[in-house]
Amino acid sequence: MNKSQNNKRIAKNTLLLYFRMIVMTIVSIYTTRITLQILGVEDFGIRNVIAGIISFMGIVTTAMVNAAQRFLAYGLGTNDMVQFRRTFSMLINLFIIISVIGIVLFELVGPYFISHQLTIPPNRLNAAQWIFQFTILDFVISTLVIPYTSAVIAYEKMDIFAYVSLLDAGLKLAVVYLLYITPYDHLITIVFMTVVAHLLSNLVYVVYCKVKLAGCIYQRYWDQSVLKHLLSFMGWNLFGTATSVMNVQGQAILLNIFFGPVVNAAKAISDNVHTLVISFVSNFFMAVNPQIVKTYANNEKEYTKQLVLKSSRFSLFLILLLSMPLIVNMKPLLVLWLGEGQVTDDMVLFSQWTLIHCMALSFEYPITQTVRATGDIKKYQIGVGVQTLMFIPICYLVFKLGAPPIASMILLTAICMIVLFYRVWSLSKILDITIGSYYRRIVIPFLFVAAISAICLHFTHIEPHSFIMLLVSCLMVAIETVLVIILLGLNKEEWIWMRNYVGAKCRKSGSRNSHSSNNISMMI
């Protein structure tokens, strides 16, 4: 396997995924604002509460996506296209079954729940029932397309994600425009058109897989052993995801019980900050994950180890670079976003500690993906799940003793770092790396760089008092963090690579300038 080409592919795919995320974020912010203006607060709230009924299936969907990506990437890693095609077909069979079960459950419970349990104005009940049906259809579309999107990721065709994102962005803008001109009920129209747009975007993945990717052809195939393996993997993956969700929801409930809804609002704002920043790291690992699975499947364990270690260092320094400007300038950034007078001290503290928690979480991604590559995740998920669930009783006890709200975020971060020891121990059972070696190469250098960056910024930062100064401050913090990473964070191998890379770029530029000078001389 050509490691140089793999590294270039990972870098290219990371940039494409970042581009995709930026486009989607900008369009989402704009369309959400316009949709709220057109629908009004009441209809906008109805749409979101109906979507929330089905949103809990996101836990199941996440488990399905992880399973599909792992098994398809493993098939490509072993170069067994027969098994790849069979796995692809079994995934479609499984997701058809899950879709049917989902439809039955939603139809049995949903209409009654909407009519008798939710607080919806009588004149909007019919619209609510209609958008519930459209939301079920959207769930089915999202479920059935998972094997195709997972195949695109397994083949590392991230440019397709970027192209489809452009299409999706255009369709979302078209839906918003249609709201201005349609004579029909705006609430029903936007949900129906959104489902149509989602269907068109996903059809691109289906057509592309059938035409361009080998093995992505459905065939009548049923294998009980493959199904059992898929369900086992999905089940334990679901357990891991569920424990994370329980901690998030448990924290929200405890904050509400002890401190009330104002603190919940602060936590909700910090959750938006968390989603934005962690998506950068998630996109990076979306490019790296297929390589981890493929190299492990191909028994290239030394290269898998290097990939895990290097991607860990890169992602940690990346999230440090993203987080430091936000942490230092959190209050003015929140004021710019939410408006003067809307920002509380709890919002600032929760948002800052959420970013610190994001850094702690970033250690987990390559380790978990390596465990998933083995296909045996039961012990790992049980170990991690049981330890992380200790957060709820400990948090309750801490609040009982009179701790402030922010103690919950500090505790969550601390537990995340404690569980890291178990994660690294699990990694050491798979790859040739000791716990001590991992901490010396990954954890201690990152904590050292983060601490030095924080100390430097504490003495050099000046509070911005205008929008221009805020931009300058964010830029200066980023530059200062980059310098600390380069001077103190890079190891010898990375220093040599950077020196050679910069030298090659300078020589190329000098050669181009010399060539241009010669051309000018000849012209004269």
Image (tube, rainbow, N blue to C red):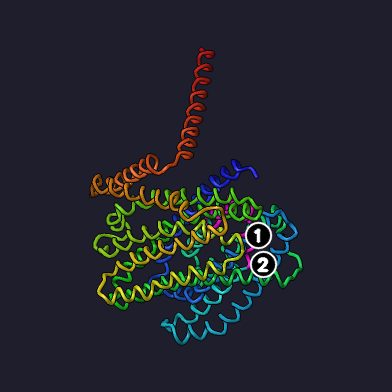
Image location (x, y in percent) of residue 243? 47, 72
Image location (x, y in percent) of residue 409? 34, 65
Position of 158 compared to 343: left or right?
A: right
The reply to whether residue 8 is visible in this rendering is: yes
Image location (x, y in percent) of residue 475? 34, 44
Residue 153: image tag:
none
Give the class, few, some or many, for how many residues have Cα within 10 Å of label 2's Cα (few <14, many ≥20): many
Tell me the quadrant of the picture where the N terminus can be found.
Answer: top right
User: Which residue is at a point 29% across and 62% down the rendered structure image?
Assistant: 349
Which of 250 and 437 lies nearest the eye of the viewer?
A: 437
Q: Is residue 124 above or below residue 296?
A: below
Which of 303 and 23 lies nearest the eye of the viewer?
A: 303
Residue 91: image tag:
2
**Mark 2 element type:** helix
First to last magenta residue range: 144-169
Disc 1 marks a residue whose amino acid type is Leu
Disc 2 marks a residue whose amino acid type is Leu
Give the class, few, some or many, for how many residues have Cα within 10 Å of label 1's Cα (few <14, many ≥20): many
Image location (x, y in percent) of residue 159? 58, 49
> Is label 1 in contact with label 2 (beta carbons under 8 Å)?
yes
Give the main secondary structure of the magenta stretch.
Answer: helix
**Mark 1 element type:** helix
Position of 333 compared to 75: left or right?
A: left
Q: Is residue 479 above or below residue 69?
A: above
Mark nearer the N terminus (1 vs 2): 1
User: Which residue is at a point 60% across and 71% down the rendered structure image?
Assistant: 140
Quarter of the image where one finds residue 133: bottom right
- For label 1, the residue is 72
Query: Is residue 89 inside the magenta stretch?
Result: no
Query: Is residue 146 inside the magenta stretch?
Result: yes
